[in-house]
Amino acid sequence: MPRNIVRGQRVSSDLIARSKELRSNMTRAEKILWGALRRNQLGGFHFRRQQIIGRYIADFYCHAAALVIELDGKVHEHQKERDRARDEIIRSYEIMILRFRNEEVEKMLEEVLQKILATCVERAKDLTPQPPSLQGKGE
């Protein structure tokens, strides 16, 4: 189970302000995806937008599935090394990252949502503690 990165993490006021700014100025693709993820619309999974994780801000985050969703625009073409280092740190929290290009969200939203939902279902199943077996312990 991933550590609870939302509660208890110390976050600078600058990072909080930046997260709020990003929520107010979402890209077109982020707005489209958020419209499909908000209010637990995708399989009942709860997503947060512009979630602070360590010293980074993830576009979208689902705690139940320990999943970050990142949308990449043109700026990401020139910062691949930076993104790789950021992803490595986020993965150190045992969080999976799915990346989509803005164009994928804008032109193939249903396929993107299907992949996100399938990943959430699989990850949540793997992360949910199973009750101990009662096999052989009387009935």
Image (cartoon, rainbow, N blue to C red):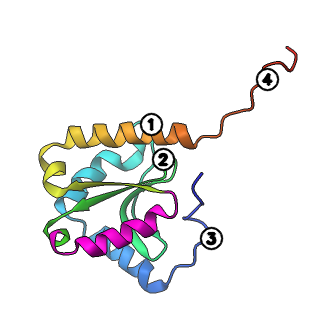
Range shown magenta: 77-94
| Amino acid type assigned to the residue bearing label 4 in the image | Leu
Magenta span has 82? Answer: yes
Residue drawn where x is 43% and y is 42% of the image: 120
Q: Which residue is mark 2?
A: 65
Q: Which residue is mark 1?
A: 121
Residue 92 against residue 123 in the figure, above or below: below
| Amino acid type assigned to the residue bearing label 1 in the image | Val
Q: Which residue is mark 4?
A: 134
| Amino acid type assigned to the residue bearing label 3 in the image | Gly
Numbered disc 4: secondary structure: loop
Residue 12 vs residue 96, the one in the foreground: 96
| Image location of residue 93, percent across then percent down | 52, 62
Give the mark nearer the N terminus: 4 vs 1.
1
- Residue 100, quarter of the rendered image: bottom left
Near mark 3 (Cα within 10 A), the count class, few <14, some 14-19 or many ≥20, is few
User: Left or right: where does residue 59 sit relative to residue 52?
Assistant: left
Residue 93 against residue 9 in the figure, above or below: above
Residue 14 vs residue 139, the one in the foreground: 139
Marks 1/2: CA distance? 7 Å
Near mark 2 (Cα within 10 A), the count class, few <14, some 14-19 or many ≥20, is many
Give the mark nearer the N terminus: 1 vs 2.
2
Of circles 3 and 4, the one toward us is 4
Residue drawn where x is 41% and y is 73% of the image: 56
Residue 78 against residue 61 in the figure, above or below: below
Give the mark nearer the N terminus: 3 vs 4.
3
User: Left or right: where does residue 11 sit relative to residue 51?
Assistant: right
